[in-house]
Image (spheres, rainbow, N blue to C red):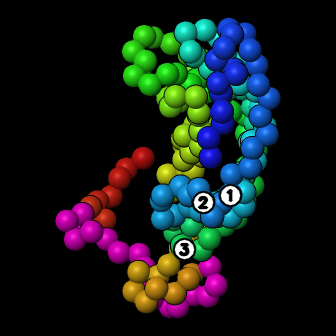
C-alpha cells in the first residue's frame, strides 16, 4: 500500500496527515516466531524538509503473537509506540541528519510505503529470547513435556562431561 506524495513534494514545508491501516493478512514479519494478529494502525504526519527528504513523526499500534523461547507457547500482546523515520529519493547518497531513533527508507517515484519503516521497528522490539513469563520452566529435553503444566519426572539437569571434574573442586571462602 503506497501513499501518494506528489503534492507533498511540490513545496518545501508541506505537511500531510496520515491515518493508515495495514492488514495483518497482507503484511507479515517474515519470521517464524512472531506474527501480526491484528491490523497495524498508524497515525502521524509526513513533512517535506527539502531535497526530496520526507520526515515521518507518528505512532502505531499492533497486536503481536510471539512464541516463548522456552516452552514455545504463543503469547499475545499489544504494542503502542512512537515512530520516527526519514524517507529519501531513490539512490540518495548525501548524508541525512538523523536522530538516533529514526529509521531510513527510500521511496519510489511519487509513492512511499510506511511498512518499510514500521517493519524495522517491530522487528527490533521483539526480544531475542522472548518468555511467556519470567519463571517459565520450558520443555523437558527427554520427552518434550511442557514443565509449566506438569512435571514429567525426568532428570533435566545434566552436566557437560568435559566439565564434570569441576564439580568435585572445593572452594574455600
Query: Is residue 165 at all visible to an observer of this figure?
Result: no
User: Residue 9, position in %: x, y?
Assistant: 64, 17
User: Residue 18, position in %: x, y?
Assistant: 77, 34
Along the viewing direction, whichever of 60 and 25 lies nearer the viewer: 25
Which one is in front in this view, the residue at disc 3 or the one at disc 2?
2
- Point out the tag, 3 or 2, that comes first from the N-terminus: 2
Q: Residue furthest left?
A: 162
Q: Which residues are magenta?
A: 148-164
User: To which residue does mark 3 refer?
Assistant: 71
Along the viewing direction, whichever of 38 and 132 lies nearer the viewer: 38
Vertical placement of 88 versus 132: above or below?
Answer: above
Query: Is residue 72 at all visible to an observer of this figure?
Result: yes
Indicate which disc residue 147 carries: none
Answer whether labels 1 and 2 touch (C-beta < 8 Å). Answer: yes
User: Residue 17, position in %: x, y?
Assistant: 80, 29
Q: Quadrant of residue 148?
A: bottom right
| Distance CA(mark 3)–CA(mark 1) | 29 Å
Local SS, label 3: loop
Along the viewing direction, whichever of 61 and 170 lies nearer the viewer: 61
Q: Badge 1: few (under 14), some or many (20 or more) residues near its Cα, within 10 Å? A: some
Q: Badge 2: few (under 14), some or many (20 or more) residues near its Cα, within 10 Å? A: few
- Point out the tag, 3 or 1, that comes first from the N-terminus: 1
Local SS, label 1: loop
Magenta span dominant secondary structure: loop
User: To which residue does mark 2 refer?
Assistant: 26
Whether 58 is among the magenta residues is: no
Indicate which disc residue 23 carries: 1
Q: Badge 3: few (under 14), some or many (20 or more) residues near its Cα, within 10 Å? A: some
Amino acid at each position: 500500500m503506497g501513499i501518494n506524495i506528489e503534492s507533498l513534494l511540490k513545496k518545501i514545508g508541506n505537511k500531510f496527515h496520515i491515518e493508515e491501516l495495514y492488514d495483518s493478512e497482507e503484511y507479515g514479519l517474515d519470521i517464524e516466531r512472531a506474527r501480526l494478529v491484528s491490523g497495524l494502525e498508524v497515525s502521524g504526519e509526513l513533512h517535506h524538509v527539502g531535497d526530496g527528504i520526507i520526515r515521518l513523526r507518528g505512532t502505531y499500534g499492533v497486536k503481536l503473537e510471539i512464541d516463548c523461547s522456552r516452552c514455545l507457547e504463543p503469547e499475545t500482546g499489544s504494542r503502542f509506540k512512537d515512530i520516527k523515520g526519514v524517507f529519501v529519493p531513490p539512490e540518495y547518497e548525501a548524508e541525512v541528519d538523523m536522530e538516533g531513533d529514526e529509521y531510513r527508507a527510500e521511496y519510489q517515484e511519487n509513492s512511499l510505503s510506511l511498512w518499510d519503516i514500521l517493519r524495522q521497528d517491530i522487528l527490533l522490539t521483539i526480544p531475542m529470547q522472548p518468555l511467556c513469563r519470567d519463571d517459565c520452566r520450558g520443555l523437558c529435553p527427554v520427552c518434550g513435556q511442557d514443565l509449566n503444566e506438569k512435571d514429567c519426572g525426568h532428570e533435566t539437569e545434566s552436566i557437560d562431561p568435559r566439565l564434570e571434574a569441576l564439580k568435585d573442586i572445593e572452594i574455600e571462602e
